[in-house]
Amino acid sequence: MTSSPGGAPSPPEDDPSLTYTAAMAELDRILREIEDEALDVDVLAARVKRAAELVRFCRTRIRNATQEVERVVAALDDEVDDTPDDEDRTDPA
């Protein structure tokens, strides 16, 4: 997690090194902090805001990965459709 000059974490989309796994780990840490009833209300608001940013980031990553997988599968299906069947081949004899 990188921080902006004011010390607050950078928005996830501005951090090219942030991975889905790292975002999920940070969300897990935030959840544990939120569940701690001793958390200051001002800190709570900041953690909830950060969690929302991370959730949006993760949803975007999942959506992008899903689209990429669908493109790859569609390309494979096209390759299979373009492959001649045994019946289409001529008998060299």
Image (cartoon, rainbow, N blue to C red):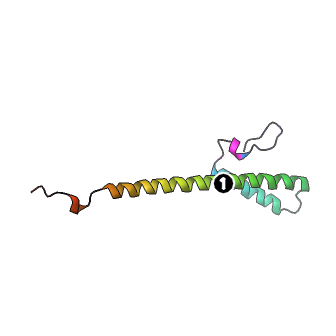
Q: Identify which residue, 41 or 62, lies in the foreground.
A: 62
Instruction: Report the residue at 66% width, 54% height from top.
Output: 58
> Can you tell which quarter of the image residue 66 is in?
bottom right
In the image, the segment drawn in magenta is 12-18
Asked whether the viewer can see residue 57, the reply is yes
Tell me if residue 17 is in the magenta stretch. yes
The crowding category of the residue bearing disc 1, from other C-alpha atoms within 10 Å (few below 14, some 14 to 19, many at least 20), is: some
In the displayed structure, 35 sits above or below 75; it is below
Does residue 4 appear to the left or right of 21 in the view shown?
Answer: right
Q: Amino acid at mark 1?
A: Cys
Q: Position of residue 19 (x, y in %)?
A: 63, 48
Q: Look at mark 1 in the image and give the residue it sits on.
A: 58
**Would you say residue 89 sits in the magenta stretch?**
no
Q: Is residue 64 above or below residue 17?
A: below
Quick check: can you spot residue 40? no
**Where does the image place residue 10, in percent across and percent down from the top left?**
75, 43
Secondary structure at badge 1 equals: helix
* Quadrant in which residue 84 is drawn: bottom left
Total labels: the figure holds 1
Residue placed furthest toward the top: 5
In the drawing, does residue 21 fall left or right of residue 83?
A: right
Q: In the rendering, at what x and y percent does residue 23 appear?
A: 68, 52
Q: Is residue 86 left or right of residue 59?
A: left
Judged from this view, the residue extending furthest toward the left is: 93
Which image quarter is the N terminus in? Answer: top right
